[in-house]
Image (spheres, rainbow, N blue to C red):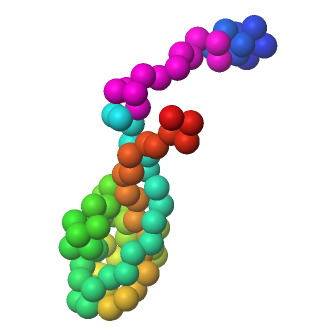
Amino acid sequence: PNAKAVHQTLCSFRKSLDGELEMVNLFELQTVHSKKSETIGQLSERTSNKLNLSLTALINDLKQESTLDENTIIKIIRGVPYQSVNR
């Protein structure tokens, strides 16, 4: 892209209003510990995991139907509210 188009695009952003920022959620990679004999589906529901079961299994190198041992560290994605540092 040319520099003028990039500049125009960047200048088109405006400052967000407080009410608008309250609607923004970020997705964060987090780790959680499983409970004994918990399935990925149960863990996902308990932890509000935003990933579907097949992706959760994939990023954790597990089979989707796996039963987890207690305290297995599992990577999930959680939605967290946006918090401005300047407001």
Q: Position of residue 51 (x, y in %)?
A: 35, 57
Magenta stretch in the rendered image: 10-21
Image point 33% across, 34% down: which residue? 23
Give the quarter of the image for residue 66: bottom left
Q: Residue furthest front?
A: 87
What residue is rendered at 27% in x and 73% in y? 43
- Left or right of 59? Residue 5 is right
Question: In this view, which residue lies farthest toward the right?
Answer: 3
Instruction: Name the residue rendered at 22%, 66% in the picture.
Output: 45
Q: How many marks?
A: 0
The answer to whether residue 84 is visible is yes
Q: Pick the quarter of the image with the N terminus.
A: top right
From the viewer's perspective, is residue 1 above or below residue 39?
above
Residue 82: image x %, image y %?
A: 43, 42
Q: Is residue 16 magenta?
A: yes
What residue sits 46% from the left and 43% below the top?
83
Q: Position of residue 24 (x, y in %)?
A: 39, 36
Q: Is residue 23 magenta?
A: no
58, above or below 83, in the image: below
Q: In front: 14, or 7?
A: 14
Image position of 16 with respect to 77: above or below: above
Q: Left or right: 68 with respect to 73? A: left
Is residue 58 visible to the viewer in this orientation of the structure? no
